[in-house]
Amino acid sequence: QVHLVESGGGLVQAGSSLRLSCAASGDTICISQMGWSRQAPGKERKLIAAIASDNTTYYERTVQGRFSISRGNAKNTLYLQMNSLKPDDTGVYYCHSELTPACGQSQSWGQGTQVTVSA
């Protein structure tokens, strides 16, 4: 089992930058991939960025070129660098992880951190 805690959210103006962090604890050696999802007000949660164990990355179309996902050297910290923020980026950002098949392939989610971008 993996426990995830996000931090770094806040209220910023459009055009600003923020860096979200996600600290993982527990069976971190079992993590195969991690990602960030966003839930905008009144909308479903949506995957916006992910990183695999080989550092292959995925970005949702609306954040491509503005957001950057990375993992710390110890692989137990996940980051999301967000630049050129827009009001549409407002939402609760959730960190999540998936374990390898050998470790049960379960998913874990953090509690979320609020990001609000004002126009």
Image (cartoon, rainbow, N blue to C red):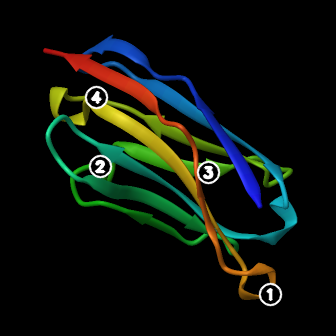
Instruction: Give amino acid for label 3.
Output: Ser
| Cα gap from disc 4 to disc 3, whole angstroms | 18 Å
Circles 1 and 4: CB atoms closer than 8 Å: no
| Cα gap from disc 1 to disc 4, whole angstroms | 38 Å
Disc nearer the start of the sequence (3/1)? 3
| Cα gap from disc 3 to disc 1, whole angstroms | 24 Å
Instruction: Give amino acid for label 1.
Output: Ala
- Residue that appears at 57% across and 72% down: 56
Disc nearer the start of the sequence (2/3)? 2
Which numbered disc covers residue 63? 2
Which numbered disc covers residue 85? 4
**Mark whose residue sits in front, 2 or 1:** 1
Q: Work out whether residue 63 or residue 27 is closer to the camera in this orientation and state it.
A: 27
> Mark 3 highlights which residue?
70
Circles 4 and 3: CB atoms closer than 8 Å: no
Q: Give the quadrant of the C terminus.
A: top left
Circles 2 and 4: CB atoms closer than 8 Å: no
- Residue that appears at 42% across and 39% down: 93
- Residue that appears at 79% across and 79% down: 103
| Cα gap from disc 2 to disc 3, whole angstroms | 15 Å
> Mark 1 highlights which residue?
102
